[in-house]
Image: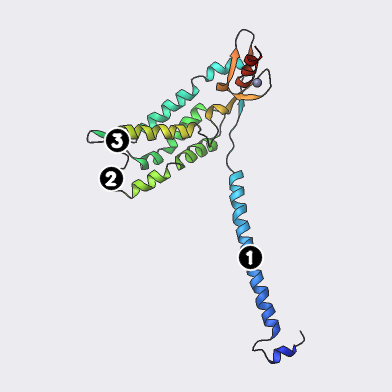
Amino acid sequence: MEPFIGDYYNDTPNCVNVIDKMNEELSEVQNENELLKKRLAILENINNCPKPTITIIKGEDIEKYESLNDDIEKELKEILNQSKVQDDDEHSLDMEDIFLSSNKLVKILKKYLVNETEEWCKYRIDSALNKYESLRYLNSYWWERIIKDDVLCDKIIDMIVESIMGDEYEPRISELYVVQCNKCNGYNSYDDIRYDKDDNTTICFNCSEEMFDDY
Ligand SMILES: [Zn+2]
């Protein structure tokens, strides 16, 4: 680079300023690059979530699934109830123990939801329990268990079961088994569809409401 006239009067030659400016820009680009890499990792992680297997069942098989929800809920509750500890005249809930028994909860899902992978069952239990991580965290800072009242214990257990069965954030367990509506051809969870034994047809709630409106 040809020396500039200003270089005789400046402490550092002009090209040094240019290099400083370029370095500054490079580090901005590098920071941005790191940020984008992190964002990409988050997005890839979302896409890597195990996907549930949706099973299509026939109208005449709906009755086989009618007790599925209750059966799973009952067994999940049995396991979760084991984390209740007798304290004087009331029970308290050992949150740490609930997290330690997650494998037993996974086994129950896998037993009933035969088409689902072990990986998905584990993912469902972990994501449900994650919602109660703050209770576990809080309890580890307290000198005694914070949930120590029978009504509260049962309430928390009910909430955990509800999260596993599917709340507003996750698809419901009953949505894993779908039936085709004979009118609109759409697929609906087995508990959102009506089966008529006599003419062997299935009608979803939306279509049956429309039929009702026609009268
Ligand atoms: Zn329909």
Q: For the residue marked with disc 1, what is the amino acid? A: Gln
Q: Residue at x 30, y 32 (%)?
A: 150
Q: Residue at x 70, y 84 (%)?
A: 14
Reading the image, the residue beneath label 2 is 144
- Please indicate whether residue 53 sits to the left or right of residue 98 in the image: right
The x and y percentages for residue 193 are 59, 19
Reading the image, the residue beneath label 3 is 149
Q: CA distance from mark 1 to mark 2?
A: 48 Å
Q: Residues within 10 Å of mark 2 (few under 14, many from 20)?
A: few
Q: For the residue marked with disc 3, what is the amino acid? A: Asp
Reading the image, the residue beneath label 1 is 30
The x and y percentages for residue 214 are 66, 14
Q: Secondary structure at mark 2?
A: loop
Q: Which is more toward the observer, 37 or 168?
A: 168
Q: Secondary structure at mark 1?
A: helix
**Residue 118 to residue 197: above or below:** below
The image's mark for residue 129 is none
